[in-house]
Structures are given as C-alpha cells and as structure tokens.
Image (cartoon, rainbow, N blue to C red):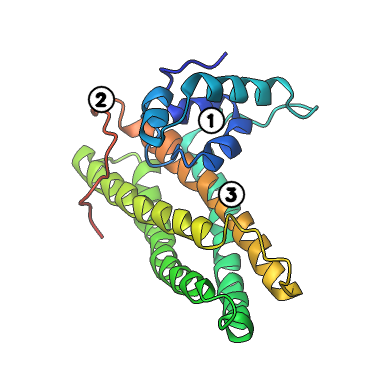
Amino acid sequence: MIAADQPVAQIVLEHPRCAGILVERDIDFCCRGPVPLAEACAERGIDVAALVAELEAAVARGPPGTPGLDPRSLTTLQLVARIVDQHHVYLRKTLPLVELLAGRVVDAHAERQPSLEEIQSVLCGLRTLLEPHLQHEEAVLFPLLIGRARSRQRIRAELDWMRAEHVQVGEALRELRTLSDRFVPPVWACATYRALMSELEAMDRDTLEHVHLENNVLAARFEQARPVASGVHTGGVR
C-alpha cells in the first residue's frame, strides 16, 4: 500500500490520514514533498519499515465514511477557490486571534513560562510574513496561473517565490511546535492558555494542508518538466 521509495507528498495525497503521523515524526511533506519516505526517515533517524507499518495501519483503520475529494481532481480554478475560501479566509481570521491570545498569556504567565515570549515573537513574525503573502498570491500568482496568457518564465519566478516563503512558514510552524511542547499546555494552565494551544494546533494543521495543496498539487501542475529538488528554494519575485 505504501512504499519506502514513494515521495512523502504522494503518500499524503493518496492517504490524507498519514499527514498527522508524518508531522509527529517531523517529516516535512509540504516543502520537501518530493523526498522519498526512506530518505526522509534516514534524515530523522527513523526506522522506515516501522513507519511504513504504522502508516499502513492508520490507513487500514481509517474512520468510516466516504473519503474526501482528491484535490488533484479539481480544475485549477476550483483548486484556487478552495485554497482561498478555506485556507486564506481561515488564516486572516485566526492570525489576529492567536496573536491576541498570546499577548494575554504572556502578560499573565511569561514569568513562570519564559518560552511564551518566544512563541509570541514567532507568531508575530509569522503573521508579518503570511498576510502580505496571501495578498500577493491572490493579486498576482493565482490570476497568473488561471489566466490564458501565461509566461513560463514569470510563472517559474512566482512559484519559486511562493516556495521560498513557504519554507519560512514551515520553519516557523516547526518552531511553534517545539516551543509549545507540541501544543500541550502545562497542568496549571488557565483557560486562555489552553485556548491558545488549541488555536495554535488547529492553525498548524490547517496551514500544513494549505501549503501542501499549493506546493504539491497546484504548483506541481506547472512544474512537470522541472527537476525535483529536495533542498530549500531561494529567489523569486515580489
């Protein structure tokens, strides 16, 4: 069902329930989606056979009901609409909320839990990065991909820009997971602290899906002829 030489992004596309397990193992299926599972496991010191067995077990015991719509079946216009309506709208609503919650929790508990100030700082940087990023995608990148008059060079530059910023987003999310002990509040945490952890966890999950769709479904349609790269992309345009 799942092979060690499969790219991690392909595993998540075919079996979405595997995403959570890969996140728990700190395997990046968003910005490093083309990397084979075996290579990703080697980088993290993970037994690939054991992980394949765990992934296959998760797929086999999946929840009842009809599987979700495969995003690869959507037209580019439908896919862009899904990204904007579900993920961009969500982030515009959630980023101010989590920053507000973080401020209140820092004021109340930073002396007892110094890492809260670091969480607040990372959140501020993430919001500063993401809000103009969303706007640029909607104003420039998405119309370029949907439009009929397409410049291959311009598309390549814009997708390089998108992927480079996604790498920064992924690094910030990973830092938030570490600083928050994977969003588990301490036993003494107040209701606001617990709400912050809950919102951060939901934002992490939604943003990973968001970046995965843009990198490994949307961008992949326009990069079929490009060589696969497993490192960090740089460059791009604003």
Give the answer, above or below, for where 117 lies relative to 14.
Answer: below
**What's the mark number on residue 205?**
3
Q: Position of residue 30 (x, y in %)?
A: 44, 40
Q: CA distance from mark 2 to mark 1?
A: 22 Å
Q: Circle 2 is placed at which residue position? A: 225
* Residue 34 visible (yes or no): no
Identity of the residue drawn at 51% across and 62% down:
179
Amino acid of disc 1: Val
Q: CA distance from mark 3 to mark 2?
A: 30 Å
Give the answer, above or below, for where 91 lies relative to 45.
Answer: below
Left or right of 179? Residue 150 is left
Q: Viewer-proximal residue, 169 or 45?
A: 45
Amino acid of disc 3: Arg
Q: Viewer-proximal residue, 81 or 95?
A: 95
Q: Earlier in the sequence, mark 3 or mark 2?
A: 3
Amino acid of disc 2: Ala
Q: Earlier in the sequence, mark 1 or mark 3?
A: 1
Q: Nearer the viewer, mark 2 or mark 1?
A: 1
**What's the mark number on residue 12?**
1
